[in-house]
Amino acid sequence: MTNSLNTSYAITHRGTVRQLNEDSHVEINSHNLWVVADGMGGHEAGDYASQLVVDVIKTSVQNISINELTSAHIISAIEEANRQLNEHSRTYLDDKTVGSTVVVLFIKEEVYNIIWVGDSRAYLYRNNTLTQISRDHSQVNELLSAGEITEAEVINHPLSNVITRAVGVTKDIEVDVIQEVINEGDLFLLCSDGLTGELSDEDISSVVDPKSIIDSGMALMHSSLVRGARDNVTCILVKNGINPLEGNKVAALRDDEKTIPLFTQQSKFSD
């Protein structure tokens, strides 16, 4: 799970309410690329949608060398996943909505690329400060940007779960990209909204430890479960610049050691 540039650690859980995990993720360290996708809860086949998005990106980029890979290839893969999900909906679901968010981190030549659709987020922890890099494609974020609501009103707003973009929902898709210079020691967090629905930016910042992405990932998951984890929770932490000891720990960590126990089980789905 490591290469000469970065160390990453991923963890996922279905939460304490939902019986099905509709999040998907992949770490492609050989290409300095990481993906989190969140199937649309309450719709048909959300788990299928998120896994298809991840699989299409993975297949597409692994057929290209890292020297040739660009953000344009990743955007094309997301557009292809959008096409396939639309076709799947027409063929098998009587045109019912099936969709997924996606957020991608791609690092190349001292530049990080954040590529996303929806409200799964990318954060950067640099110089002891946590910053959200991506901007949610959501109804409340549009209202906030327009000055119609305040930051304080965002948290409990009735439209907080309404997203304005997702892969598979419309024929054409608009993908956002941010490219910035990366620094040694930068720590990135990709996550589904199951994490940010339970933890504020301040909560996340308080448990993130740049010295250990493993401890940080487990602390984030534990904190979200303690808060109730009403949605699926997935996060990937990526550290630019390997700590050799932690790199070995990540590589040796078996999947069953990443499992966090499910505290309670309630209703099957919630929107």
Image (cartoon, rainbow, N blue to C red):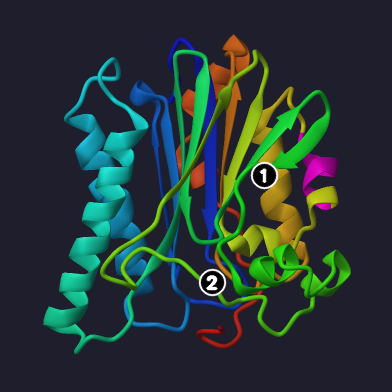
- Residue at x 24% of width, y 49% of height: 56
Residue 263: x %, y % from top left: 67, 69
Residue 198: x %, y % from top left: 73, 64
As rendered, which of 84 and 47 lies closer to the eye?
84
Q: Where 193 falls versus 153 (above or below)?
A: above
Q: Is residue 126 magenta?
A: no
Residue 239: x %, y % from top left: 60, 24
227 displayed left or right of 9? right
Quadrant of residue 97 within the rendered picture: bottom left
Q: Is residue 206 magenta?
A: yes
82 displayed left or right of 210? left
Residue type indicated by callout 1: Met
The residue that mark 1 highlights is 218
As rendered, which of 184 and 182 lies closer to the eye?
182
Instruction: Give the dominant element type of the magenta stretch: helix, strand or loop.
Output: helix
254 displayed left or right of 189? left
- The magenta region covers 203-208
Residue type indicated by callout 2: Ile
**Other-residue count near label 2 (Cα within 10 Å), few / some / many at <14 / 14–19 / ≥20:** some
- Residue at x 36% of width, y 63% of height: 167
